[in-house]
Amino acid sequence: MPFSFVSYYGKKEPLLASILSNLQDQILDILDDRFRPYSLEQIHGTIIGLETIKIHDQIFGKWCDNQGKAVQTP
């Protein structure tokens, strides 16, 4: 299954800013003062590709060297 995460540092588009703000509020509701949220401009991340390829009955990570070993078997 193709799957990638992409995130942004700095100013966010309104929809993304709203989603992130909502998530921060939900985390605050659960963790209270144990959570100190970053400003929206500080939130960032890494692009991660989790794509896999299937060879016969084994699944391999497409973007990493698994030394010929399957990531998982079905």
Image (spheres, rainbow, N blue to C red):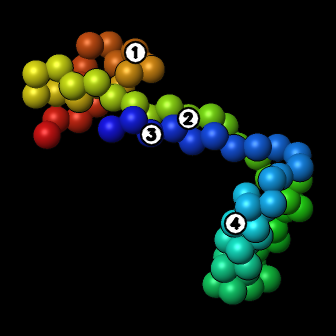
Instruction: Measure how far apart labels 4 and 2 are at the Cα level.
Output: 20 Å
Helix, strand or loop at mark 4: helix
Q: Is residue 48 above or below residue 15?
A: above
Q: Is residue 19 left or right of residue 11?
A: left
- Residue at image point 69% right, 66% down: 19
Q: Residue type at mark 4: give it.
A: Ile
Question: Residue tagged by mark 3?
Answer: 3
**Disc 1 designates what residue?**
65
How would you rate the neighbour count of disc 1 (Cα within 10 Å): few for under 14, some for 14-19, many for 20 or more? few
Q: Nearer the viewer, mark 4 or mark 2?
A: 4
Asked if the residues shown at circle 4 and circle 2 are in contact, with their CB atoms under 8 angstroms apart, the answer is: no
Q: Earlier in the sequence, mark 1 or mark 4?
A: 4
Alpha-carbon span between mark 2 and mark 1: 15 Å
Label pair 3/1, CB-CB below 8 angstroms? no
**In the rendered image, which residue does mark 4 sit on?**
19
**Mark drawn on residue 48:** 2
Q: Is residue 51 above or below residue 62?
A: below
